[in-house]
Image (cartoon, rainbow, N blue to C red):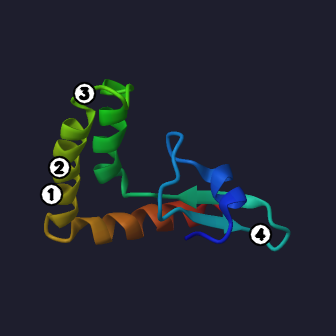
Amino acid sequence: MEQHPDVMDQFLTMGGRSVPIVIFADTGGHVLGQWGPRPAHVQRFMIEFKKENPDREAPDYQDKLAEVRKDIIKAYGERNESHAAVTAELRELVSGF
């Protein structure tokens, strides 16, 4: 599916390949910054979930994951806040280059 898994593996999110990840690099290929896979107000749900559920083989892992995904969808859907959040986060990131 992805054309450059070797590059993807340099930018894992909590050990996994999350999409999208935006990578900013200069003309020499040096990474200046990265963003993703979600705005911070949404990603916090997954960060907390992973902290509380480190065992992916646990019998209730998938059920708990389904619940956190509902929270993530809800956070994305709140009055299009995520669009403004992504824009603000990207602006902040690039302003440091």
Q: Give how far apart the Cα atoms at labels 4 and 2 are.
A: 36 Å
Graded by Cα atoms within 10 Å as few (under 14), some (14 to 19) or many (20 or more), the crowding at tag 3 reads few
Reading the chain from its start, which is encountered first: label 1 or label 3?
3
Reading the chain from its start, which is encountered first: label 2 or label 3?
3
Q: Residue at x 19, y 56 (%)?
A: 75
**Amino acid at pointer 4:** Asp
Q: Residue at x 28, y 65 (%)?
A: 82
**Amino acid at pointer 2:** Asp
**Circles 2 and 3: CB distance less than 8 Å?**
no
Q: Position of residue 39 (x, y in %)?
A: 36, 57
Q: Position of residue 89 (x, y in %)?
A: 43, 61
Q: Give how far apart the Cα atoms at labels 2 and 3 are.
A: 21 Å
**Amino acid at pointer 3:** Pro
**Circles 1 and 3: CB distance less than 8 Å?**
no
- Look at mark 1 in the image and give the residue it sits on: 74
**Circles 4 and 2: CB distance less than 8 Å?**
no
Graded by Cα atoms within 10 Å as few (under 14), some (14 to 19) or many (20 or more), the crowding at tag 2 reads some
Reading the chain from its start, which is encountered first: label 3 or label 4?
4
- Look at mark 2 in the image and give the residue it sits on: 71
Q: Is residue 76 left or right of residue 47?
A: left
Q: Residue at x 44, y 57 (%)?
A: 37
Q: Is residue 2 left or right of residue 46?
A: right
Q: Considering the numbered disc 2 on the image, is that residue within a helix, a strand or a loop?
A: helix
**Circles 3 and 4: CB distance less than 8 Å?**
no
Q: Position of residue 62 (x, y in %)?
A: 25, 39
Q: Give how far apart the Cα atoms at labels 1 and 3 are.
A: 25 Å
- Look at mark 3 in the image and give the residue it sits on: 59
Q: Give how far apart the Cα atoms at labels 4 and 1 are.
A: 36 Å
**Circles 1 and 2: CB distance less than 8 Å?**
yes
- Look at mark 4 in the image and give the residue it sits on: 26
Q: Give how far apart the Cα atoms at labels 1 and 2 are.
A: 5 Å
